[in-house]
Amino acid sequence: MMPLTNSILTPKINVFRELSKGKKIQVGVLAQNKQSVYFQYDNTYLSSQQNLSPFKLKFTNELQLAPKTPHNKQHGVFADSLPDGWGLLLQNREFKKKGRHSSEITAMDRLSLVGNTGMGALSYEPAYSKQDEINQNFELSALGLEAQAVFNGQTEEVMQALIAAGSSGGARPKAQLYFAPNDFSKCRTNPIKGDQAWLVKFTSANLPLKHEEGLCEAVYLTMARCAKIDTADWQLISAPKESGASHWLALNRFDRQLSPKGQLTKIHMHSAAGLLDADFRMPSLDYQELIKASRVLCKSPQAGQIQFARAIFNLLSCNQDDHAKNWAFLQNDNGSWKPSPFYDITYSPTAFNEHSTAFIGYGKEPPLKIIQQLATDASFSSWQEAKEVIEKVSDAISQFTSVAKSQGVQKNTINQIQKQLNKTWKDNSQIF
């Protein structure tokens, strides 16, 4: 097989992966011509590691053409590194400063701009900027206010800091930041020894729950934990008064881990959107598909049961923005996979009151037989065992008002959400 070279396809990007002890190895090469993007695994990686994307990439050294959709002519596993929403806004503004219109920018350009700042363990070279050299210290309050102002279209100050911090995607202004343990006052865009990695979500009056977005997500995380569902660790950080928020939400990044030597290392992460070539911008995933894929990928019936519990939580809590990019998996150095912690869970009704991920074709109010079929697909030993999970989730969500009060959510917001939760429970009472 002829290797990829600049003489065949341009431009070319080298793809690297960081292993759990910090060692960086080359995965392969991405290259693009006028029609398509191709990927080729590195022979050394093939002989020593495992497939990054088992459902869509062949683990061979042949050239692999990216599908035209749904990732803008990019392979799903690398599209996972690309931002959307807020992160896309930051990237477009950065390219504009260099005189490039967004219509001229390819996915390869965006990967180059991501460099080594993306989620997961993958990085891309040559990088668009020398991100390792951008490591200023910032007051979190000042950075959050600037992010909020940028989101509201008022200023572009500290744009470079936000670019260096990166974004996980989604509409909310946010930043991937590093903090010393138990100190959220100052942050960095690159870690030093002993730092912890956090994703900080800021707020805006233009968001559906306005400046209570972080508080409400914290309530949902608490309820999920009460239902024995694994979530990322989180903290509510006091926000400056002028932000309009009482708190911002910080989530400990589960794609980073602290080594015994105090260095942060990376974990390979792959979304269901990238794994299954599902378009997260529209309803394109079904819980049946997700549960079966989880069992196969993780080689464990328990993985399907984990996803079943999360599906029920989303159904009963009116978390309808449960699109394909809000499901992810983590791979260790040995190639074993497991579901990531539950994330991006909050009150999020959609315009038509339908879930982005369907319940065997039902966008809402799935019949009992559908939930029973999902339980079977998830390898529960009996319907009674699945019912116990449903009851545990229901009991946790029934605590919404008390948990929300304890987190300082305003009364009007509590009443609004509780009213919808009551209706959602009634609409789905057939599953109990």
Image (cartoon, rainbow, N blue to C red):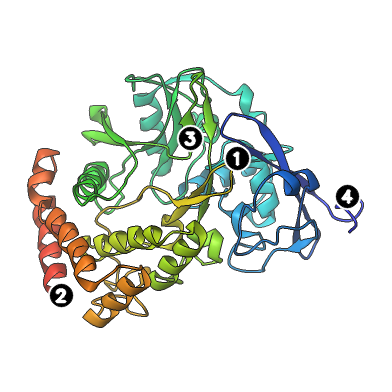
Front position in the image: 64 or 216? 64
Residue kind at label 1, given as amino acid type? Glu
Question: In which quadrant of the rendered view does residue 123 lie?
Answer: top right
Up/down of 324 relative to 128, above or below: below
Mark 3 or mark 1: which comes first in sequence?
1
Q: Which mark is residue 94?
A: 1
Residue under numbered circle 2: 427
- Foreground label between 3 and 2: 3
**Residue at horizontal 24%, vertical 36%?**
244
User: How far apart are the alpha carbons under marks 3 and 4?
Assistant: 33 Å
Circles 3 and 4: CB atoms closer than 8 Å:
no
User: How far apart are the alpha carbons under marks 1 and 2?
Assistant: 46 Å
Front position in the image: 419 or 44? 44
Q: Which mark is residue 122?
A: none
**Residue at horizontal 8%, vertical 55%?**
415
The percent coordinates of residue 221 (x first, y second) are 25, 46
Q: Which mark is residue 5?
A: 4
Mark 2 residue element: helix
Mark 3 or mark 4: which comes first in sequence?
4
Answer few, some or many: residues within 10 Å of disc 4's Cα (few below 14, many 20 plus, some between 14 and 19).
few
Circles 1 and 2: CB atoms closer than 8 Å:
no
Question: In which quadrant of the rendered view does residue 390 lie?
Answer: bottom left
- Foreground label between 3 and 1: 3
The percent coordinates of residue 146 (x first, y second) are 41, 32
Mark 4 residue element: loop
Mark 3 or mark 2: which comes first in sequence?
3
Compared across the picture, whether 209 is left or right of 255 comes to left
The percent coordinates of residue 238 (x first, y second) are 24, 28
Residue under numbered circle 3: 256
